[in-house]
Structures are given as structure tokens and as C-alpha cells.
Image (tube, rainbow, N blue to C red):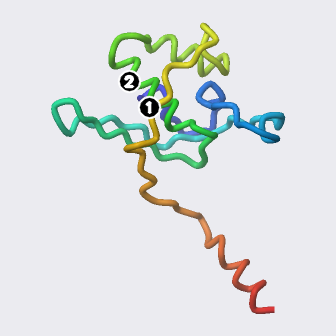
Amino acid sequence: AALLQNREPFDLAAFHTTQRGPQRKQPIDGLCRLERVAVQRIGLEVYRITIRGDRFLYKMVRNIVGTLVEVGLGNLGCHQVEDAIVRGNFASGRKPRCAPANGLVLQRVMYESDPFEEVGSMAEK
């Protein structure tokens, strides 16, 4: 988890899943800053993974969780994750399993300024 945490944005395209439809052809800006990536054991086989960042790519959180599980099971080494970050993809060409969406919770969305302020002022006109 510590490998993914950073102060400055870096390319996390390795954890992106290609979207379907017209978005598939659009270039991917993988620069993201993950301020917090934490794994906490809360039960016998239950873990809480907290990820906080400035933005997220399509299915990025699910791919990161799947990667952390693979590392925890010993199926993937930390060096392979590091290499994937540097290369922009996993060397085998195959990403670790994508974690299922059930159990994934968006806890909070924070903005530096109110994004709806401008929309409200436009509606008043």
C-alpha cells in the first residue's frame, strides 16, 4: 500500500480499466495523487482498505484493491507492482483481479471550492 501513496501526482495508468464505447479511444491521463492508501484488519478475514486521492481513473480503486489482495496472498510481489507503476502496465500484460464492486463505498467527496456555486449563480440569471 505504501508504494501507491504519494505527495506528488504520478502515473497510475497501470490500474486503469479501458472503458467501453466512445471513451475507449480517448487518451488516458493517468496522473493521480493518492494521499492515503491504508489497509486495516477489522476481522478474522475482513479488511478495510482506505484510498484517498485527488482523482480516480475508471475502476482504479477496484484494481488497486485487487492488486493489494494478490500481494497479500503472495501471488504478486511488491517489485511487480513497482514495475507496473513505472511501465504503466503489468509486465505479464494481465492485470491482477479487479475487486468486485460490492463492498466498495464512496465515503465522501471533498472540493477545494464549492463546484455548485457557479451553477447556482447561473440559475439565478
- At horizontal 42% and vertical 56% (from top left) the residue drawn is 107
Count up the numbered dots: 2
Question: Of the residues shown, which amino acid type is indicated by label 1?
Answer: Val
Which residue corresponds to mark 2?
69
x then y, percent, for residue 114: 61, 73
Query: Marks 2/1: CA distance?
Result: 6 Å
- At horizontal 78% and vertical 41% (from top left) the residue drawn is 23
Contact (Cβ within 8 Å) of mark 2 with mark 1: yes
- At horizontal 65% and vertical 75% (from top left) the residue drawn is 116
Vertical order, 1 against 29 (above or below): above
Other residues around mark 2 within 10 Å, as few (<14) / some (14–19) / many (≥20):
some
Task: Decide if residue 6 is on the left or right side of residue 69.
Answer: right
Vertical order, 97 against 48 (above or below): above
On residue 95, the disc is: none
Q: Residue furthest top?
A: 92
- At horizontal 63% and vertical 40% (from top left) the residue drawn is 57
Q: Residue furthest front?
A: 21
Query: Quadrant where the C terminus lies?
Result: bottom right
x then y, percent, for residue 72: 34, 19
Other residues around mark 1 within 10 Å, as few (<14) / some (14–19) / many (≥20):
many
x then y, percent, for residue 98: 50, 28
On residue 65, the disc is: 1
Question: Of the residues shown, which amino acid type is indicated by label 2?
Answer: Val
Q: Quadrant of residue 91?
A: top right
x then y, percent, for residue 24: 78, 35
Q: Residue furthest left?
A: 44
Name the one closer to the observer, 108 or 103: 103
Task: Decide if residue 25 is on the left or right side of residue 92.
Answer: right
Query: Quadrant where the N terminus lies?
Result: top left
Q: Quadrant of residue 102?
A: top left
Label 2: element kind: helix
Label 1: element kind: helix
